[in-house]
Image: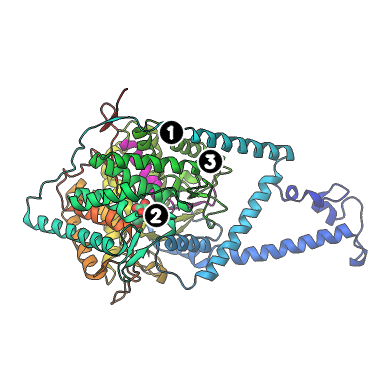
Amino acid sequence: MPVGGLLPLFSSPAGGGLGGGLGGGGGRKVSGPAALRLTEKFVLLLVFSAFITLCFGAIFFLPDSSKLLSGVLFHSSPALQPAADHKPGPGARAEDAAEGRARRREEGAPGDPEAALEDNLARIRENHERALREAKETLQKLPEEIQRDILLEKKKVAQDQLRDKAPFRGLPPVDFVPPIGVESREPADAAIREKRAKIKEMMKHAWNNYKGYAWGLNELKPISKGGHSSSLFGNIKGATIVDALDTLFIMEMKNEFEEAKSWVEENLDFNVNAEISVFEVNIRFVGGLLSAYYLSGEEIFRKKAVELGVKLLPAFHTPSGIPWALLNMKSGIGRNWPWASGGSSILAEFGTLHLEFMHLSHLSGNPIFAEKVMNIRTVLNKLEKPQGLYPNYLNPSSGQWGQHHVSVGGLGDSFYEYLLKAWLMSDKTDLEAKKMYFDAVQAIETHLIRKSSSGLTYIAEWKGGLLEHKMGHLTCFAGGMFALGADGAPEGMAQHYLELGAEIARTCHESYNRTFMKLGPEAFRFDGGVEAIATRQNEKYYILRPEVMETYMYMWRLTHDPKYRKWAWEAVEALENHCRVNGGYSGLRDVYLLHESYDDVQQSFFLAETLKYLYLIFSDDDLLPLEHWIFNSEAHLLPILRKEKKEVEIREE
Ligand code: DMJ
């Protein structure tokens, strides 16, 4: 849109617009400041303020020069494809830091002393961008159009609300078929047996301490020996119990599973007047309950999963149907994270509901859950993708992308994972998901995947065309994803994707190996002369994350290369040496230090994911075979929905 169009009020009477007014168009003469008319003074004032805004913009919004240099000069090369353009985009540093901090804060990670200043800068820039975008959009429309849009949006949201409130007719009876591969034999090799037993002992230590010091609360503080509550779950309680259910089941910790089940029956309550993260509650609670149901056939888990699913439906009451990130479970009012690009929803959050919601429809006989997530697909498929990439932000009101930041780590990660798994979980019938996945992966390879000078393949972050040569611990899950998808890859590409998975596994192993504690940092860089090492203090922590074990698990299952068991065992030893304390397992503030500085949180995903993946690495492949089970983003188990006979069939009445 031309600038003149943004300033319609300031056109000169001669109709020459801004240029005409200043340049004397229309026959007016300007003899000196004293002779200026009020309108002209006003125009001058405007030009002056525009100049100030430009200066402000230059200081705060242009890209950081070091980043530009690292993008252009750093001697990394595309891992497998030609280099992406290094176009300078708007400065992304403050926004990035704010995102990271906000997410870490939510996950209970250690704080950052420089936070306040960066937060402020990020907020100023966000507000500025949002105001500009809104003004631009509004000025493009006629008043009648604006009014009509508002009315249409209101009507749509009201209709959705009415539909979701339609009485839920209770759960249909089902035939529960005993699931495949949930009981395991002891591994034949004594050394492997011993290792597996050790991992079970770790689970016992984590569980018993949670039970002793934080029973019924969300997570354990293993140093101070009390409960830890994260705002992610509002005041829903028992995150560790629900997250641990299926790990207890497959490790055959029967008494513990029974006590967890009783707690769910008697105490798990979703009627809470508090705001929760839709994504976190979905992957941990809905996923945990569904998984416990499919493993055990206990009806209570199906009932609770569907009850919670219904509670989450109001999150989808937005004009586009792209759900809010945050939802008050009682009022049904949703909103987005204040730091997320002008009120956007986050790709990895709304893109990580699909698997659970498909199963909710299957188990409840109600298509509404599936409809909600299929609509997300529809919205995404209508949008232009910059360079074929999916930005991390999407505005649920306009249905348009927010900032063009792309990541296979935080904010983007599990969206890609769920595309692949949606295809696999549908018994390979969901060809749309398959296409979306492989198209996205191709764009990621072209624009984000690079090789360092010593030959380590890594996945960088993309900010409007500019690469940041940093890889998050979260991104390490992608090794497993590439390998898992290899089988369905376009012709001649299967081996390539398996190798790509192996390369990512190697890089992530290096990120562990190059620390003192032998546990990987939250993010590691490939610039400024380092490779696979965290250089910023606020990226040196380890919060018991599972992604590297996840990739080892898939690589082990798919290749049986013994190095994956070796690397997994190194991690077990490191966890025992540095994270194990009397009161459970704690995260570490800095994996490069000689002495542990504990963060005092035993994350629920340590029991749901880290220990489960480790246990599977030292089990035979017939425990939870990949041909029958899909792991959700929190490592909860969902069976493949077979074309012919599903694991659980709704009974015809
Ligand atoms: C888990 O809650 C899930 O794996 C999620 O998708 C990403 N992060 C954590 C563990 O790191």
**Residue that carries the numbered disc 3 in the rendered image:** 317
Coordinates of residue 559 in the picture (x, y in percent): 19, 48
Frontmost of labels 3 and 2 is: 3
Neighbour class for label 3 at 10 Å: few (<14), some, many (≥20)? many
User: What is the quadrant of residue 646 in the picture?
Assistant: top left
**Residue that carries the numbered disc 1 in the rendered image:** 168
**Residue that carries the numbered disc 2 in the rendered image:** 409
Q: What is the CA distance from the residue labelled 1 to the residue labelled 3?
A: 18 Å
Upstream in the sequence, badge 1 or badge 3?
1
> Magenta span covers which residues?
402-425
Q: Circle 3 sits in a helix, a strand or a loop, which is it?
A: loop
Q: Is residue 553 visible?
A: no
Q: Are marks 1 and 2 in contact (CB under 8 Å)?
A: no
Task: Inspect the image, locate mark 3, and give the three-letter code of the amino acid beneath it.
Answer: His
Q: Nearer the viewer, residue 334 or 53?
A: 334
Neighbour class for label 1 at 10 Å: few (<14), some, many (≥20)? few
Is residue 248 magenta-colored? Answer: no
Name of the residue lying farthest toward the bottom: 594
Q: Nearer the viewer, residue 266 or 334?
A: 266
Q: What is the CA distance from the residue labelled 1 to the residue labelled 2?
A: 37 Å
Upstream in the sequence, badge 3 or badge 2?
3
Q: Nearer the viewer, residue 309 or 50?
A: 309
Q: Circle 1 sits in a helix, a strand or a loop, which is it?
A: loop
Q: Circle 2 sits in a helix, a strand or a loop, which is it?
A: loop
Left or right: 573 in relation to 586: left
Q: Residue at x 67, y 62 (%)?
A: 54
Task: Inspect the image, locate mark 2, and give the three-letter code of the amino acid beneath it.
Answer: Gly
